[in-house]
Image (tube, rainbow, N blue to C red):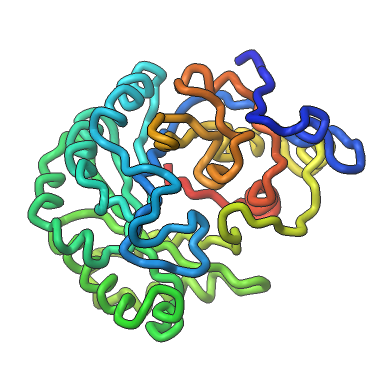
Amino acid sequence: MDGSIKTGGSDLDNWLYTPKGEKRGYIQPHALKELWFHTGTACNLACPFCLEGSKPGDTRLGLVKFEDAKPFIDEALAMGVEQFSFTGGEPFIAKDIVKILLYAAQFKPCMVLTNATAPLLSRLAQVEMLQETKFPVSFRVSLDHYEAEKHDEGRGKGSFDSAVIGIRALLERGFNVSIARHMTEGEDSAAVDAIYHDLVGDMGFDQPPRIVAFPEFNTPFSEADVPQITENCMTEFHTEAGRRDFMCAFSKMVVKEDGKMRVYACTLVDDNKDYDLGGSLDEAMKARVMLGHHRCYSCFAYGASCSEA
């Protein structure tokens, strides 16, 4: 890796240094273990907290087609990728998502993030075909809160019950399902996870599912008042091994932006063109990732990660 510096338009000094003039912290990618595809920001729901700003008909990021995804799947395979993951928006709004998964799962395991409501439920007959792939396709379903009423506050009345129907449908068809939830400041995470495990106990899980908790990421293009991550922070609070566990060290995300496929540093920074690292995975993996986005602090401080790889 050559540690090249890429920036999509910011002042270079601001990119490399914090407002106090300290060297900004960074991650140098070491290997492509996981490749993410953003299938598009269109969604059947319009959650006010959505970190992608997704809603019905949204076109900030375009719906990915099979011919868009295949070259990146092939390039990633040549680079030794270990898993493909898919997020949105709602991936099952993308017409070609099952076709893409059928292709990718010939070679590596795949994971799909979904709200498990109408778009998924309407395509269960197609989803069943994913049982026959060489490598498994798994799903992560969002249950923001263990109380249906609080979940529905953001996603709409009946969304919790619909998601539960989706989870049961996936489990009945033999798919592995994990759960994504919201994290609250100062929570006892183990205790909250235990409540979730009790909640889902009658949904058909053979064993307690993996629970992935996310801190507040704020909506796209927002600014959050968080501490700046300096180069010293990264060496004082993280070992070399710890830095290699940051998602931007081992994964990238492909998006369709203005009709063109682009590679971004990770799943959380596609609202900032400074993190557009090029049109190929080879180019993107050579670029040093400066930790200047406010969401980078969530990874630094909380160990937040979208990955299950």
Q: Residue at x 57, y 54 (%)?
A: 220
- Looking at the picture, how far across and down is residue 241, in whole percent? 64, 34
- Looking at the picture, how far across and down is residue 111, in whole percent? 32, 46
Q: Considering only vertical position in the picture, is 186 above or below 234?
A: below
Judge from the rendering whether residue 169 lies leftward or rightward of residue 18; answer left or right. Answer: left
- Looking at the picture, how far across and down is residue 116, in whole percent? 27, 63
Residue, far top: 2
Q: Residue at x 59, y 62 (%)?
A: 215
Q: Residue at x 25, y 74 (%)?
A: 162
Q: Residue at x 72, y 33 (%)?
A: 10
- Looking at the picture, how far across and down is residue 161, in whole percent? 27, 79
Quadrant that contains the C terminus: top left
Quadrant position of residue 195: bottom left
Q: How many marks?
A: 0
Residue 89 in sight from this viewpoint? no
Q: Considering only vertical position in the picture, is 260 above or below 1?
A: below
